[in-house]
Image (cartoon, rainbow, N blue to C red):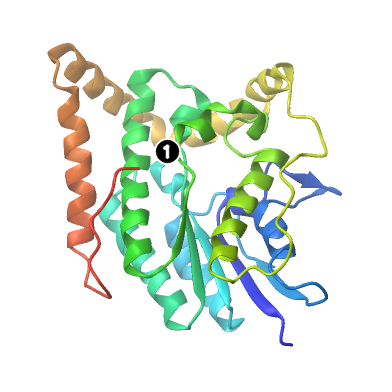
Amino acid sequence: MTPVTYVALGDSLTEGVGDPVDGAWRGWAALLAAGLGAPGHAVDFHNLAVSGAQTCDVRDRQTPRALTLAPDLVSVVVGVNDTLRCTFDIRTVATRLDEVYAAVTAGGAVLLTACVPDPGAMLGLPAALGRPLARRQRAVNAVVHALSERHGALHLHAADAAWVADRTLWSADRLHPGERGHRMFAARFHALLAAEGLALGAPPGTESELPPPSRAASLLWLATAGTGWVARRCTDLLPQLLGLAAEEVRHTVRGTGAGLDVRADHAAAAALAGLVASGPQAQPEAA
């Protein structure tokens, strides 16, 4: 029997950051790959995800490489890094994702997608800073929802409150899943595939082999590596984010904060409406 070829595209979440094994990142995609094939049948797994990748990187670099592998299954989980850039534009994100999804499905591959929590919630940012990021991520998730339906993807809803609130699922950096989080992510994708008869192996175990990070470890990360992470993004995002925060405060004082949510929702809807139809038109849904 010909091995199933699975290619994973995306950023650090798919690369496996937060789930170290033998000096390297493993992650949910590798755990999922192990449960795709029937017992005794190999899976040809390729993880092309790169930490820091944006939708342009997935479209321009990762997708062409993936197509040369003639994949049977492709996962595309990306978008958080786009929201952390001053160049963020939901119309551009929607266009890139539509092109990636179309390219993957045109080759006959099964497409896996997911929406993810906003980084502001994960980091516990103050409301004035966190809400603008949350709106951006909700917009990305709305686009991912709609385009997943349009292109017939199997879509995983992973932005729910319970997922965010369970700190045992997350690594010390507060942004990436820990081992248990990666296992849960893989198990939920496996369940989607199994329901379609596309995952024939055993589902990934959901219990971690290592203990979750302690509060002390989280604080240490924030004081060391976390400081560098924030500093690298501050040079790009912070000036704009401070402006967004000031706007947030003004609207909060005036009692018109809901208008910012409506504006973001309209922008996501307009981004989808502006795409050239490549299948049944789907409407954005709330993340």
Q: Extreme bottom residue here? A: 1
Residue with the mark numbered 1: 236
- Residue placed most toward the observer, 35 or 101: 35
Is 224 placed above or below 159 here? above
Left or right of 91? Residue 58 is right
Rendered residue at 79%/30% (across/down)? 211
Rendered residue at 73%/16% (across/down)? 216
Is 172 placed above or below 208 here? above
> Where is residue 193, by image quadrant?
bottom right
Q: Amino acid at mark 1?
A: Asp
Residue 66 location, x and y as percent?
57, 75
Can residue 96 be seen here? The reply is: no
Left or right of 19? Residue 165 is left
Rendered residue at 49%/44% (across/down)? 158
The quarter of the picture where the N terminus appears is bottom right
10 Å crowding of disc 1: few (<14), some (14-19), many (20+): some
The quarter of the picture where the C terminus appears is top left
